[in-house]
Amino acid sequence: MFDRTFLRSRVARRIFGLFLVSAFVPVLVLALLAWHQVQQTNETHARQHLQARAGAYARALHERLLNAGLALRALAESPLDLATVLQGGGLHEEVVFRRVIRVAPPRGGDVGPAATADWMPAAPSDHEWLHLAGGRAVLRAPTTRNGAPWLGVALDPSDPARGLLWAELGLAFLWETDEALGSDVEVCVAQAAQVLHCSDPAHAHVALALDGTADGAPALVDGMDVVARSVPLKAAFDAPPWRVVFMHPRAGVGAATLADAWRLGAMGLFTLLLVAWLSVLQIRRTLVPIDRLIEGARRFAKQRFDEPVAIDDERDEFGQLARALNGMARQLGTRIEAMRVLADIDRELLAGLDLDRVRERVARRIEKLLPGTQVRVLATRDDERRAGGGTWIGAAPDGDAVAAPPRALIATLTRRAALWLRRDDGTAADEPWAPASAWSDALLAQLGLERGLVLPALWRDRVCALVAVAGVEPAQVGDSVLRQLRELTDRVAVAFAARARERMLEHQASHDLLTGLPNRMLLKDRVERDIAAARRNQHHVALLFVDLDRFKQVNDTLGHGVGDALLTQAVQRLRACVRDSDTIGRLGGDEFAIALPGLRMPHDAARVADQVVATLSAPFRVGHQECFIGASVGVAMYPDDGKGFDELLAHADIAMYRAKGAGRGCVVFFEAEMKAHERDRRQLAHDLRRAIERRELEVHFQPRVDAASGRVVSAEALVRWTHPQLGAVPPARFVPIAEEVGLIDALGEHVLAQACQRVAAWRRAGCRVDRVSVNVSARQLRGGQLLHAVRRELRAAALPPDTLELEVTEGTIVDASAAVTDLLHTLRADGVRIALDDFGTGYSSMSYLRRLPTDVLKVDRSFVAEMADDPRALSIVGAIVAMAQALGMSVTAEGVETQAQAELLVGLGVDELQGYLYGRPMPAGDFAARLERVSAETRSRCRPETASRRDGACGGAG
Ligand code: C2E
Ligand code: CA
Ligand code: CA
């Protein structure tokens, strides 16, 4: 731990360095000061020592000289001893004196060596004589190089002339202290400029250099501490003073100081080590908790909250910080755990929406939050919505739904709150227990509980689920737990709402929105299931294609609101016709399909189909409106008419189409030949489209003659198509196809353009033609392009609008919507004439005639044909003529083939006649020949060269 943290931590290094520096600098300064001080002291001490020793030496030397003087005196006064000494033996004082000589007085002596050798001291001076006479000794410097000083006394002080005794002092005696000096101290003795003795002759110059220095004062010479002491010899020996010089090399003092310095250094080092050790100890005490905190924070950052920061001392700041961090981590841990669970649930919601898994997860999570509890997530039943007829899709599929809490109870809850429920035991409910109610009693009974916590999962103010927690007391649920419970409950709400939405979408995807019936997709599913079952059971499945006959007209005239209501009613009637096992589907608009599975005999289907037609033929009542719709039904049977749904439906469709063609309100069973027919029809539609694109359609003209004058006054334009393989195809065959496949506008515009251009050309050629009639289909009237086309073609041909007559069939008018009526009024206001074609075959009532802008009634061919044989047909035509005259309309009779018919019609007062009697529809060129010329000049131009015999020339008909 120490190494890791200590070496790695920058803080540790910094503090450690700081500690060391702060200890090292004072220690160093202190050491320097101390060293200096020690040095000074050592020096002073050495000097004092030197002084003391020099003094002692000087005194001892003085003493020895005095003693030697006394000894010599004594020798002089003892003639016996002296004689022995002088004869060279028995000189027991030889330690004191090296040799002793007697010097005869100037008058000449008789003993001892010659008194005048050069090594002998010189004769005393006068002054010395006086001194000797006083019985005192004289001191002389050495006479030889390695000699010693001499002492001299008078043999007889009262008569110095008797002779002198000289003694050379013993070197060892005189300088005796040499050995006791010690190695580092040297001593020299000098007299004036002569060095008498030096313990180390090498230092003699030092003794001389000191000449003149104050007595006892220390000096520094040549790196040596030097102390000089003078030995006064005047009084005792009548000699100049000696100087004792003690010296001591400085290096010796330094060495002593160095030893002290070592001690100091060791102490400093010890101090530093102590400081380092203590600082490391303190740093450790600081850094280890910091390190743990850092480690802990890193762990928490990695979301490992299970391992808290270890705490050594709860009381210090680190302990407090660690405790705070641990607390934070705990909270964060639970929070993150909660978020993780929520995120998991969210993922679940987004991924597959497995409602049961979400319920399971929420329950387990709450059980972990509140240990010891049992949790159930319950779907609720919404009785209100069920009663409304819709499917409440919040309910669980397993059916263990419970009743939703009453709305009043929910209203008392804030969005975050929970319900504490308790069975009614007669006592008043106090906070936080909710007041007892029948609902809570029932719920608790259903769950087998006495008390519990219930959280409603709200979605758009509806309770879609309940989270029930058993085995929990209010005290256990703090704010934070309650918040988590709410979050989890909200997820439940989302899950249930998502499931509801999913089901709604599923339902919408497979059902019709208005009627709630299965759509084509679902129908196909069911029919195919039915077919599979029928295959196993050898049964039949009938598929009924039901098309409402006049629904479009009702929708157009009375509006979509009425149309929707009508469809809903129609569906209700259809439901009444079928069994539960049957499926009704809406294919779109007013088309329905009914699957009747499990039929033993095909004719069972006929009964249902008839019933469908019958029930839809009964009048519908929407508001104040009464409508007649009716239906056409086509039936296809499995297995005879198809093996799969698509085939069956296509065949039922063909059959239904037949039913429509056969007059509405019929049931037609599919037959194989219908299919071939249908195929032909498709081929024809295809060919027709090409023919229109290539402008291969021709327009023929049939003359209409004035009943009174017999003149050709008008032409009906009739479209003609010569098919490359089939030859001439009658318009009655291909016009309905053109209507159906959306080619009618192109076809109609082509005919309109041809008609207008032809009439304009005839007029320019001087032929007299009042009008041209163009047939307009119902689909064109509804299409919205007709008005524009009419105006354009009239303008292009520069024709006045009243030249053009539009023939609309009576059926079209009967079903006319407001838009169609408006269009007809606009056209009429433009000046275009409107004729009611095939009049008498449709269902027009007098009110239609009054309401619609009509100029001409074209009596249908069937009346004309039957007129001769059937008196009732004759009277109908008569009535039509009378009515037309009363309404200010003119009457044209169609299909006049015989003269007799013509005469009858003229007799009835018909205005114009049209029919084979006056000419079949013919190409434009032929028709022009039938026209009367306006003037003589243009006559020739109107007569075509190839005019037929019958058609003669213009006006030939008259
Ligand atoms: P429609 O408007 O009633 O036309 C008259 C039909 O009666 C024509 O048949 C004509 O040839 C036929 N016809 C005329 N006189 C006699 C006669 O004396 N005896 C008999 N038996 N028939 C006679 P077509 O040309 O075959 O047309 C049939 C229907 O096709 C037309 O009935 C009309 O509804 C429709 N049609 C023809 N051309 C067009 C057109 O350009 N546009 C539209 N929308 N429909 C057209
Ligand atoms: Ca016509
Ligand atoms: Ca007609």
Image: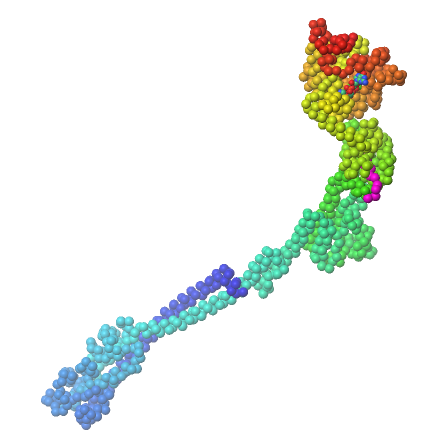
Write the residue at 38% across / 71% down.
261
Residue 886 vertical placement versus 343 (above, below): above
Q: Nearer the viewer, residue 345 or 93?
A: 345
Q: Nearer the viewer, residue 546 or 153?
A: 546
Write the residue at 73% across / 10% down.
947
Is residue 545 located in the magenta-colored stretch of the structure? yes
Please tell me in which quadrant of the rendered image residue 111 appears. Answer: bottom left
Question: Taking 71 as reference, is 607 left or right?
Answer: right
User: Where does the N terminus fall, quadrant-wise?
Assistant: bottom right
User: Where does the C terminus fall, quadrant-wise?
Assistant: top right
Q: Which residues are magenta?
A: 536-546
Is residue 680 located in the magenta-colored stretch of the structure? no
Question: How many numbered marks have been drawn onto this rendered protein structure?
Answer: 0
Would residue 397 be visible to someone looking at this image?
Answer: yes
Residue 588 vertical placement versus 15 (above, below): above
Residue furthest to the front: 725
Q: Position of residue 474 (x, y in %)?
A: 73, 57
Q: Position of residue 570 (x, y in %)?
A: 82, 34
Question: Taking 261 as reference, is 372 left or right?
Answer: right
Q: Position of residue 471 (x, y in %)?
A: 75, 58
Q: Position of residue 704 (x, y in %)?
A: 78, 13
